[in-house]
Image (cartoon, rainbow, N blue to C red):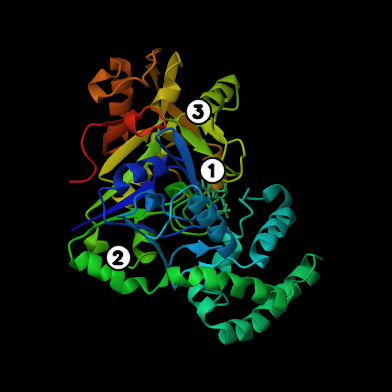
């Protein structure tokens, strides 16, 4: 039996999809435990690109059971669209189940997401407008709808009558927007119910059996530690817990059964949306990094903010998640930079910080302390073993591990599977 948790160690978009794909065919089960279709995982296999938002990337392997856990918020429309795309691309997706406890994104959630952002004005968060925050708000407020409710039309109707009164009140009175119609929502969601029904399960016995039968399980994280609702740069965060702890609550797997935690980090840093970013590069060097790294969002197409590798952030991710092994992705993007920098900590009001502080207005103004490295100035994409990498590149990678307090076991130098250099295997 082994349970591996995979988390993003920065602000998301670290290249987790690729790592999950690498591991998915050697595990029996892949579970997504938080987030929704705000996430975007790109997997390239055999030169073909697959984009996933809700469905675990393990779906490409028919023998691997893919579970959407109850910590996820599922937009049924987006789910069915993704399913259709997979099926029309020849992937039947029979190996997929959704927890009946997973909450649903309702049609008013994306609208409220967008209106809420507009109302915040200059203080907006830069959300994905997918309704993720409002769906989690309703879950906590105990007025959310769960996937299992699709199988109870009378309950759905009665509850919707009450909930829609609250929603329409905010929409019309607070935002001066159009109200939603109860019957239209019911018809739409009961229409989805027919197609989603075969996938809905009580995942508790499935997961317990897998644990007790000694199966190999992979918990697939979305977003990253710095977007965590508690540990991240609040309020510039997502509304779930993209951490190892969140993986447990979002799946029902107890912490004592976790065998290892793998953290995925980009060889530099990116962030989408607003909020503090101490090592951000807003100059020509930043533009070069964005262009070479093709740093545009999978979900929204937005240009990502880019900057140097921040070991203060990554060390915090390693420590708060118990990361045993690091994967460093997109190392090849740094191939043509003459000088590279790694931030080792911050100075704030004359005080040294080895981790990001909670006070985001202080974090916004910290002075990063940098170590400089000579670039390797040669292509790494054709390297197939870690030892083939230029010495300066290995020095950079090893220093990253040292500063973060975990070893870099896997390095990625390109999008395809063959561009993955394994120093120490992530699974036994
Ligand atoms: P939300 O998750 O749509 O509410 O957005 C909140 C913040 O999280 C915004 O800054 C988003 O850009 C960011 N975010 C959400 N999902 C992802 C992701 O998959 N990758 C990177 N950033 C994300």
Residue ID for mark 3: 293
Which of the 4 image quadrants contains residue 352?
A: top left
Which residue is label 1 attached to?
A: 362
Q: Decide if residue 50 is on the left or right side of residue 218.
A: right
What quarter of the picture does the N terminus occupy? Answer: bottom left
Give yes or no for contact between labels 3 and 1 (Cβ–Cβ under 8 Å): no
Mark 3 or 1, closer to the camera:
3
Q: Which element type, helix, strand or loop, lies under badge 3?
A: loop
Q: CA distance from mark 2 to mark 3?
A: 35 Å
Percent coordinates x, y for residue 152 in the rendering: 53, 83
Residue 276: x percent and y percent? Answer: 55, 41
Report helix, strand or loop for mark 2.
Answer: loop
Q: Give the residue at mark 2.
A: 253
Quick check: 214 left or right of 64?
Answer: left
| The residue carrying mark 1 has its beta carbon less than 8 Å from ligand 1 | no
Marking on residue 105? none
Residue nearest the viewer, comparing 140 with 379: 379
């Amino acid at each position: 039996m082994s349970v591996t948790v995979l988390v993003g160690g920065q602000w998301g978009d670290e290249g987790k999809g690729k790592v999950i794909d690498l591991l998915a065919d050697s595990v029996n089960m892949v579970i997504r435990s938080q987030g929704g279709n705000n996430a975007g995982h790109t997997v390239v296999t055999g030169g073909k690109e697959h984009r996933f938002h809700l469905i675990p990337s393990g779906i490409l392997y028919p023998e691997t059971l893919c579970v959407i856990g109850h910590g996820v918020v599922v937009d049924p429309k987006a789910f069915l669209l993704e399913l259709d795309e997979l099926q029309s691309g020849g992937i039947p997706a029979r190996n997929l189940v959704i927890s009946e406890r997973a909450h649903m994104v309702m049609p008013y959630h994306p609208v409220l997401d967008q209106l809420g952002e507009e109302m915040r004005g200059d203080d907006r968060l830069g959300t994905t407008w997918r309704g993720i925050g409002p769906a989690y708000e309703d879950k906590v407020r105990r007025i959310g709808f769960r996937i299992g409710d699709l199988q109870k039309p009378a309950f759905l109707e009665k509850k919707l009558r009450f909930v829609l009164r609250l929603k329409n009140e905010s929409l019309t009175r607070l935002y001066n927007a159009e109200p939603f119609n109860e019957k239209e929502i019911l018809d739409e969601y009961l229409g989805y119910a027919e197609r989603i029904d075969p996938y809905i399960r009580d995942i508790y016995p499935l997961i317990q059996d897998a644990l007790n039968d000694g199966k190999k399980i992979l918990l697939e994280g979305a977003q990253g530690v710095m977007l965590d609702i508690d540990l991240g740069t609040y309020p510039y965060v997502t509304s779930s817990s993209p951490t190892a702890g969140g993986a447990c609550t979002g799946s029902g797997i107890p912490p004592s059964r976790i065998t290892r935690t793998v953290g995925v980090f980009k060889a530099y840093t990116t962030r989408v949306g607003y909020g503090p970013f101490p090592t951000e590069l807003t100059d020509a060097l930043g533009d070069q990094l964005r262009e070479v790294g093709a740093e545009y969002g999978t979900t929204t197409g937005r240009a990502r903010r880019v900057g140097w590798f921040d070991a203060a952030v990554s060390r915090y991710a390693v420590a708060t998640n118990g990361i045993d092994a690091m994967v460093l992705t997109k190392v090849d993007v740094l191939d043509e930079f003459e000088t590279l920098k790694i931030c080792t900590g911050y100075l704030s009001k004359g005080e040294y910080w080895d981790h990001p502080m909670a006070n985001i207005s202080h974090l916004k103004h910290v002075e990063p302390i940098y170590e400089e490295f000579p670039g390797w100035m040669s292509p790494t994409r054709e390297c197939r073993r870690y030892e083939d990498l230029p010495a300066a590149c290995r020095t950079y990678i090893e220093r990253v591990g040292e500063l973060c307090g975990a070893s870099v076991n896997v390095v990625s130098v390109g999008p395809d599977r063959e561009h993955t250099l394994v120093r120490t295997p992530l699974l036994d």
